Image (cartoon, rainbow, N blue to C red):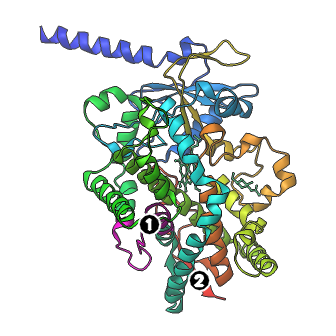
């Protein structure tokens, strides 16, 4: 009796798996053989997603092929292989691809219902409301805040340098960006530079370091969203969530009580919270945001902003430390711009073209977000093919693989900032460089992230010469369990004051 029962269950399971793993075959979409349980993510426990998707991309890419099928565990995912098709997905046919399909669970994890995860109309309304915080006018207003933090950052670095010690820059830069974002988003002097154990930094660190459990939860939620919601699965640890909720509550209370206006991100959120309904009888909840909703946006600003920018800067310093010639060129670019503009002004920063090239080249070689995701919201016929991507299907844009494709970047492992000289940029497809994504859902913090990296790099180049310390492993090993693409071990540099 039991024997038959087990046999039936096993047969059903095998039948189900077979049919799952023939999803792409049945639809005539090129694909790779996939096996239970990882599908085409075999190796996920030891390798970063960027490396895995690059392997699939290289095996599947073929002239004229727009897309191919892969499997994340047992879920079919369409991988974009062609840059024109990247453009269709991100820009031209955006109306089919406006969602990411990431896991969030507003009930149990209210902080996760933010711009990055929200979908459809809710996303659109919120995006329009938040966009004004990120214009170049607003960036210019935040610029002095960032330079003030950078100044402090550079002084505290100077103090350590004077003792002759090597410095671990990954952590150091994460403290810098935490401070910048804590100041700009929360209006706090969170002082993580002065005190490495400051609560913000600690909380920021634990968001990313609870991995690989976090990574597995995110992947599980991505694939079995309804089930995960029914199970009340949360991705934010309770103490971390409580900390941010309290930080936002205190900031809001303080500002409302004392009528503090700082023209920053938090001000805009408070305005949205207190907004009167725009029209009489308008039931649209989003004209007015609840406290939880604004807390989620502040949280997003923090999460999306600090680790991405700090890893971008870490890799940039690492590459410049390895190549003194490039470093000297970058320093000259800083000094020239400062000379022309008198000091390190907003205008001077955007005149440091070579530094910008260096940052872009590290965003190419090490894109912090290695893959971009979209979820199909309406059956979509792929142009010039018979393939129909069904509603609910996930689409992956392999940013890292594209950035390492020798067709677009000859000798892709070489760090060469001249790739971003205007004449070289003009020769490439617009979609060959997409570290911030593109289209209506492009990274909302792109200007902010670039400005922060430029200020940080310029400050360091102006004041210090640096080289790799002996204890840094070359090449850097990427941390497989971090969602963001960053180095696993510390990156130690030896600095010298100029
Ligand atoms: C070097 C730094 C950064 C990199 C490489 C980066 C990368 C990205 C990428 C690839 C996306 C997805 C875009 C798409 O789907 O087309 C994204 C979205 C987003 N990023 Fe960034 N980002 C950075 C800095 C920041 C900063 C500083 C903030 C906040 C201040 C931020 C906030 C966001 C938000 C809110 C989204 C979701 C936008 C939406 O769905 O409407 N990012 N980012
Ligand atoms: C560097 O990248 C940013 C963001 O993609 C872009 O706006 C800028 O034009 C790039 N700069 C150069 C010199 O290519």
User: Would you identify the image quadrant in which residue 401 lies?
Assistant: top right
Residue 173: percent from the left, percent from the top? 51, 69
Depicted 403 relative to depicted 287: above or below:
below
Mark 1 Cα shell of 10 Å, populated few (<14), some (14-19), many (≥20):
few
Depicted 326 relative to depicted 151: above or below:
above
Depicted 170 relative to depicted 485: above or below:
below
Q: Is residue 114 magenta?
A: no
The residue identified by callout 2 is 495
Please state the extent of the stretch shown in magenta in the rendering: 177-202
Depicted 383 relative to depicted 8: above or below:
below
Between 98 and 437, the one lying in front of the other is 98
Q: Which residue occupies 37% across, 34% down?
A: 221
Between 36 and 466, the one lying in front of the other is 466
Q: Quadrant of the N terminus?
A: top left
The residue identified by callout 1 is 260
Left/right placement of residue 275 relative to residue 339 reads left
Q: Which residue occupies 45% across, 41% down?
A: 43
User: Would you identify the image quadrant in which residue 281 lies?
Assistant: top left
């Amino acid at each position: 009796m039991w024997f038959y029962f087990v046999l039936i269950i096993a047969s059903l399971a095998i039948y189900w798996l077979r049919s799952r793993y023939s999803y792409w075959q049945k639809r005539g979409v090129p694909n790779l053989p996939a096996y239970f349980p990882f599908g085409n993510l075999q190796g996920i426990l030891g390798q970063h997603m960027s490396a895995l998707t690059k392997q699939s991309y290289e095996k599947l890419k073929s002239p004229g092929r727009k897309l191919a099928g892969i499997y994340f565990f047992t879920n079919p995912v369409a991988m974009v292989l062609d840059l024109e098709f990247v453009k269709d997905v991100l820009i031209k046919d955006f109306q089919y691809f406006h969602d990411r399909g990431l896991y969030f669970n507003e009930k149990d994890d209210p902080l996760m219902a933010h711009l990055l995860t929200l979908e459809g109309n809710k996303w659109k309304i919120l995006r329009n409301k938040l966009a004004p915080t990120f214009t170049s006018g607003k960036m210019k207003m935040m610029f002095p805040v960032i330079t003030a933090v950078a100044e402090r950052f550079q002084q505290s670095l100077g103090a350590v340098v004077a003792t002759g010690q090597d410095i671990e820059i990954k952590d150091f830069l994460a403290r810098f960006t935490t401070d910048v974002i804590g100041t700009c988003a929360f209006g706090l002097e969170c002082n993580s530079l002065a005190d490495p154990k400051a609560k913000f930094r600690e909380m920021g660190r634990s968001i990313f370091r609870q991995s690989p459990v976090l990574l597995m939860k995110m992947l599980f939620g991505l694939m079995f969203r309804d089930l995960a919601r029914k199970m009340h699965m949360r991705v934010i640890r309770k103490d971390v969530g409580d900390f941010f909720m309290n930080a936002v509550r205190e900031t809001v209370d303080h500002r409302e009580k004392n009528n503090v206006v700082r023209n920053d991100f938090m001000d805009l959120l408070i305005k949205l919270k207190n907004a009167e309904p725009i029209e009489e009888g308008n039931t649209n909840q989003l004209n007015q945001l609840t406290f939880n909703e604004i807390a989620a946006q502040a949280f997003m600003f923090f999460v999306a902003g600090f680790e991405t920018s700090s890893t971008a800067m870490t890799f940039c310093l690492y590459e410049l430390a390895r190549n003194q010639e490039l470093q000297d060129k970058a320093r000259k670019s800083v000094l020239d711009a400062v000379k022309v503009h008198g000091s390190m002004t907003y205008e001077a920063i955007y005149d440091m073209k070579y530094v910008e090239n260096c940052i872009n080249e590290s965003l190419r070689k090490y894109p912090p977000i290695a893959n971009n995701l979209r979820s199909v919201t309406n059956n979509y016929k792929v142009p010039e093919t018979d393939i129909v991507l069904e509603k609910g299907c996930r689409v992956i844009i392999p940013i890292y693989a594209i950035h390492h494709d020798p067709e677009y970047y000859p000798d892709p492992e070489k760090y060469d900032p001249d790739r971003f000289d205007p004449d070289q940029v003009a020769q490439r497809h617009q979609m060959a460089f997409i570290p911030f994504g593109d289209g209506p859902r492009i990274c909302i913090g792109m200007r902010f992230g670039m400005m922060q990296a430029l200020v940080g790099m310029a400050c360091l180049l102006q004041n210090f010469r640096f080289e790799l310390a002996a204890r840094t492993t070359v090449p850097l090993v990427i941390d497989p369990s971090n969602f963001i693409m960053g180095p696993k071990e510390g990156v130690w540099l030896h600095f010298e004051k100029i």
